[in-house]
């Protein structure tokens, strides 16, 4: 089964769930590029045309992929839009892979898609789904550990990529949404939001600052420097797997452990 994932975090999960019965290609995978600025190519169009299953993030995050699908209609191709499955729409925070519950829902739907395309191997796909649950357990355990130890602790974030995970961890994300949303959209945050973020950092109102290393701007770089000058730990997160070739759960677990280390250093 040929599977194409618009982003490699869903591609990693799709590969783990499909095992030997799938060939997965991920389109957006460059750890040094901003996924929001991705422009599709003729090679992407060919991969989409040949796919049995296409996995999209949705909610406006990968509109380029929807355009490719619309331009290459194929009767036998199944498309799974994670945002649609979750009841999300364009304008909602699209970083669903940072929500542990959404990851589980997406995994269930990927498995269901595999079974609908290749029903003779349904038992195998059920087995792989169970195996994936086991492989996610250290990640789930780390989420629980941070929530138990640091629930209610204030943190900052340079953009909206970490909003879902902060909620899952029980952390109090105090950065104004206007600041995070602007950075996510590649525009300058309102001056009032910038001042509020700077005040939170300068006065030590947050215990750690999470920043997206793939969407660095002059504003976010200045906020990071201000945090460093106030001895507030900073924790890098990314929108694509790092290092390339890592599994979804290993990538996420590394970032969570980095965050726990930052929180413990300032407790």
Image: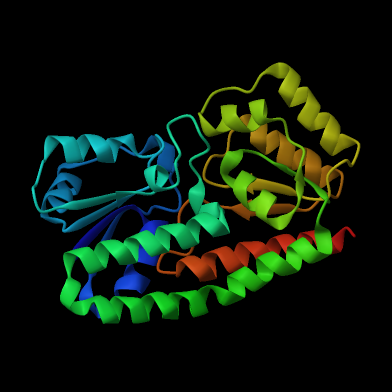
Nearest the viewer among 148 and 224 is: 148
Where residue 193 appears, as percent x and y from the top left, is 72, 23
Q: In what quadrant of the picture does the N terminus appear?
A: bottom left
158 vs 189: above or below = below
Looking at the image, which residue is at 59% across and 53% down? 237
Looking at the image, which residue is at 38% across and 41% down? 58
Q: Is residue 62 left or right of residue 242?
A: left
Looking at the image, which residue is at 87% across and 44% down? 230
Q: Is residue 97 left or right of residue 71?
A: right
Which residue ends up furthest to the left in the rendered image?
A: 75
State how the image is colored: rainbow
Q: Work out whether residue 108 can be spotted.
A: yes
Where residue 240 appears, as percent x and y from the top left, is 45, 54
Q: Is residue 246 left or right of residue 207?
A: left
Where residue 243 appears, as percent x and y from the top left, is 47, 64
Where residue 168 appears, as percent x and y from the top left, is 66, 55
Q: Is residue 150 left or right of residue 220?
A: right
Looking at the rendering, which quadrant does residue 253 occupy? bottom right
Nearest the viewer among 21 and 112 is: 112
Q: In what quadrant of the picture does the C terminus appear?
A: bottom right
174 vs 238: above or below = above
Q: Work out whether residue 212 can be spotted.
A: no
Nearest the viewer among 44 and 56 is: 56
Which residue ends up furthest to the top in the rendered image?
A: 191
Looking at the rendering, which quadrant does residue 61 occupy? top left
């Amino acid at each position: 089964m040929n599977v194409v994932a618009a982003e490699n975090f869903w591609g990693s999960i799709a590969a783990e769930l499909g095992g030997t019965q799938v060939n997965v290609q991920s389109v957006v995978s460059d750890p040094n590029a901003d996924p929001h600025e991705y422009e599709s190519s003729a090679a992407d169009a060919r991969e989409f045309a040949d796919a049995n299953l296409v996995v999209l993030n949705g909610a406006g995050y990968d509109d380029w992929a929807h355009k490719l699908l619309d331009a290459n209609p194929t009767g036998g191709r199944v498309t799974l839009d994670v945002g649609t499955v979750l009841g999300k729409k364009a304008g909602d925070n699209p970083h669903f892979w940072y929500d542990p519950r959404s990851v589980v829902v997406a995994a269930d739907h990927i498995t269901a898609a595999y079974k609908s395309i290749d029903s003779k191997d349904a038992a195998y796909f059920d087995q792989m789904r169970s195996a994936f649950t086991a492989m996610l357990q250290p990640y789930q355990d780390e989420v629980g550990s941070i929530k138990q130890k640091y629930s209610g602790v204030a943190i900052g974030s340079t953009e909206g990529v970490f909003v879902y995970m902060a909620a899952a961890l029980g952390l109090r994300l105090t950065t104004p949404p206007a600041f995070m949303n602007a950075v996510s959209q590649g525009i300058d945050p309102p001056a009032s939001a910038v001042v509020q973020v700077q005040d939170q950092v300068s006065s030590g109102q947050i215990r750690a600052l999470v920043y997206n290393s793939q969407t660095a701007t002059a504003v976010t770089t200045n906020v990071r420097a201000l945090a460093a000058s106030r001895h507030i730990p900073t924790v890098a997160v990314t929108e694509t797997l790092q290092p390339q070739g890592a599994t979804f759960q290993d990538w996420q677990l590394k970032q969570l452990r980095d965050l726990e280390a930052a929180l413990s250093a300032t407790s």
